[in-house]
Amino acid sequence: MTRRAKVAAAVGLLALTGCSAPNSEAATHDFASWDEVVSAAEGQTVQLWMYGGDQQGNAYIDDVLAPAVAEQGVTLERVPVTDTADALNRVLSELQAGRTADGTVDLIWVNGANFSTGKEAGAWLCDWTSLLPNMDKTAVDDPLLSDDFGTPVDGCEVPWHKAQFTIAYNSDIIENPPTSLAGVLDWARAHPGRFTYPAPPDFTGSVFTRQVLYSVSGGYENVPLTYDQESFDELSPALYEKLVDLAPSLWRAGDTYPASSDELNQLYADGQVDMTMTYGPATLTDLVAGGVYPAGTRILTLDEGTVGNASFLGLPSNAESRAGAMVVANTALSVEQQVAKADPEAWGQFTVLDYDSLASAEQALFDALPKSLVVPSYDILSTNANPELSAAWVPPLDEGWRTRVLGAR
């Protein structure tokens, strides 16, 4: 089942009974202080549901975060899923069944459409993040942390790390890389078979199409962040025309597309294509060092910038181990954990902490992280960063790709 279908299925669980969302009002916590949270968390087991296909991410949770949480009397168990919608689906099923306080999902690694869908259904506990002491280390005016794909966060999820859409290339083959997305597409047409992208609704393939939408529209400033049918009808034809024109120059002449970002990455690792793309560019350092990717792998820094966002930890409104989940989230936000997670040898994810507000000793921990010859710093990667479109844009753009691009072959 596709990502879009799974999100739709999650919402459909509510519709099957002809009822509205099981909890139309956002659930809130009942803790008076952080000390009370810590006391209640003692001995609890927290089930963290997250995408299980990232080996570095899995190892970070199991070997770094879980031991740190255990020191505080909380057991952290990772529940791998193939799609975040699977976790949301479970929460909505339990809420519909009347399980309002003993749910089996305590935390979800989430953002975008899944967060929006869950918020509309009252699936998230809200107004809890202000209890976390380490939230003070984030910037209150950071738009990536206050807005998730056009949906206000409203204390319903805690930031975990930032991401920047990035295209990587083999510099041993591409000596004069393009400096704009339009240039990337021109390069692909000039080198048939050496470029492709994952088929939407794969997360990476989907953001690639949104990046192309920005490009053919003359920049993100010309695309309204809030979805409306008129804007879609006006702007999307140029997007699909561009992608249809590109298709014959793609890997396998566009007759087939990688089903996932993992498949695209494997094509790049095998030398079948000369570019790949990712939302987690810091992980490239370890992939090159381990010989998985070519030694000449480098990052394209596009003049117009690329799409950036943040991912979060959401706490379901019916979680059985609420207090323990809060302890896990606060620990994940600590300087020590954010530094460990940012280390390319651990996971290589960009911090959500406000570097300028940290103490000099805390800044020094980030400064001491190994520098990469492959990946520039986040400050460079996020130059001219493009905002994410609202989650409501994603399904129609993905469906339009299926019918107008894939269907044109």
Image: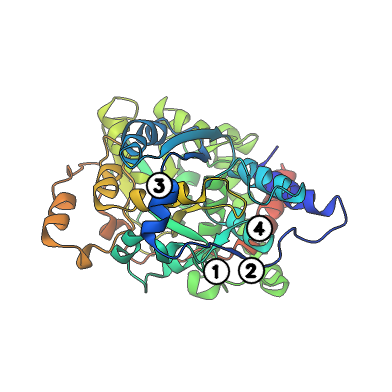
Q: Which tag is nearer the camera, tag 4 or tag 3? A: 3
Q: Which amino acid type is shown beneath numbered disc 3?
A: Val
Residue at 71%, 45% in the rendered image: 94
Return the residue nearer the eye: 199 or 324. 324
- For disc 4, the marked residue is 117
Q: Could you say which disc has been placed on residue 328 in the image?
A: 3
Discs 2, 1 touching: Cβ within 8 Å: yes
- The answer to whether residue 171 shows anywhere in this view is no
Count the numbered circles shown. Answer: 4
Discs 3, 2 touching: Cβ within 8 Å: no
Secondary structure at numbered mark 1: loop
- For disc 2, the marked residue is 235
Percent of width and height locating residue 255: 65, 35
Quadrant holding the N terminus: top right
Residue at 27%, 58% in the rendered image: 380
Point out the tag, 3 or 2, that comes first from the N-terminus: 2
Percent of width and height locating residue 290: 28, 26
- For disc 1, the marked residue is 217
